[in-house]
Amino acid sequence: MSEDIDVVVKYKSVTELMHDLKASLIALIPVFDAADIPWSDSENYELLEEIAGSLFNGIVGYTIEKYFNDGQDFESRFAKYSFYYKDYSNKSFIEIINSDTQDNKKFIFVALSNGKEPFDTILYNIVNSYGKIEIDNVEMPFESAQFAYRHRDFSGQLTQYEELK
């Protein structure tokens, strides 16, 4: 017999959710080492990206989905972790809020990677106002970033949310 369990979600800022994602990956480093899962070698990221993607879905995606609870097909519209899209015109996504953005360009989060420290670097794409990628695989230090969720409704309208409260 299965029981429905109500999960209570604590809403936070999107930046806090992304910090939780980074902290969870760092906390798993001893597990990665014990299981011989490469996490510091950019050549062997496949399994790590699967794990990081699951954490991203559970920590960031789930919280955002519960916040909106709009009955829409959230999962197919929310940009996946470490997935390179050619076009974001029909996607909701995590945006890096940066004062350097110009000309309606958006910095769209793709994944975390290792720089000088574990998971201290953000990989992102620069996207124009039509959702087309202009530059991909750009790097930025994690600590300098602020994040927002860009929700795209079925009409194509984007709305920015920095706080989920």
Image (tube, grey):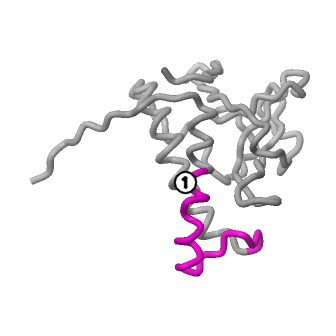
Q: Which residues are magenta?
A: 23-43
Q: Residue at x 61, y 66 (%)?
A: 48
Q: Residue at x 50, y 32 (%)?
A: 64
Q: Which residue is mark 1?
A: 24
Camera-side residue of 86 and 124: 124
Position of residue 160 relative to residue 73, above or below, is: above
* Dominant secondary structure of the residues highlighted in magenta in the image: helix
* Percent coordinates x, y for residue 144 in the rendering: 79, 37
Q: Label 1's element?
A: helix
As drawn, the residue found furthest toward the left would be: 1
Camera-side residue of 26 and 63: 26
Q: Residue at x 76, y 36 (%)?
A: 145
Query: Number of callouts in the render?
Result: 1
Hey, which quadrant is residue 29 in on the image?
bottom right
Hey, which quadrant is residue 37 in on the image?
bottom right
* Percent coordinates x, y for residue 117 in the rendering: 76, 59
128 within the magenta span: no
Lateral position of residue 90 relative to residue 70, left or right: right
